[in-house]
Image (cartoon, rainbow, N blue to C red):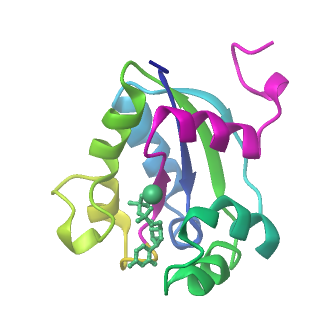
Amino acid sequence: MSNKTFAIIKPDAVAKNVVGEIIAMIQKAGFKVLAMKYTRITKVQAGEFYSVHKERPFYGELVDYMTSGAIVPIALEKENAVEEFRKLIGATDPTKADEGTVRKLFGTGIEANAIHGSDSDENALNEIGFFFSKSEVVGNQ
Ligand code: UDP
Ligand code: MG
């Protein structure tokens, strides 16, 4: 089992100036940061990243939203990382997320829900590779 996961602090949270608070929550929960950057992506990149959702009605808006401002992609490590991180961020819809989760605290809607978290070990490794070259990830040198 992989001990890595991948996160993106999304444009709504970056615009709210809560990047530092979210990273503090992630670190306090015991995740080690392996790679991180403050960047923007193109519509082509966002479309590829979320290609699993391309038939869903929200896909076009999701691509527009993810390209509307800066994002912070982060590679993370912890035992049972994928599941532990999904617990930390909470349900997709912030109104349904548990108290104290990142999405409950910082999300503003089902689309602008502050943060992404990988849903499987396989996707975590693919998503880290989508944003970071191997040598940028701590431990991969
Ligand atoms: N999303 C949306 N409308 C929906 C469901 C999802 O805009 O009805 C967005 C939301 O930003 C979500 C992303 O699409 O985080 C990916 O959806 P997914 O079902 O994979 O949720 P997640 O894994 O992020 O909880
Ligand atoms: Mg998902």
> Magenta stretch: residue 63 in it?
no
Q: Could you tell whether 111 is left or right of 68 in the image? A: left
> Magenta stretch: residue 126 in it?
yes
- Looking at the picture, does residue 59 appear above or below residue 97? below
Quadrant where the image shows the N terminus: top left
The answer to whether residue 64 is seen in the rendering is: yes
* Of 86 and 108, the residue lying toward us: 86
**Quarter holding residue 62:** bottom right
**Quarter holding residue 113:** bottom left
Residue 44: image location, x then y, percent: 81, 71
Residue 91: image location, x then y, percent: 27, 60
* Of 42 and 47, the residue lying toward us: 47
Q: Residue at x 49, y 32 (%)?
A: 121
The answer to whether residue 42 is seen in the rendering is: no
Q: Residue at x 70, y 70 (%)?
A: 47
Q: Over which residues does the magenta segment extend?
A: 113-141
Ligand 2 image-quadrant field: bottom left
Q: Residue at x 46, y 75 (%)?
A: 112
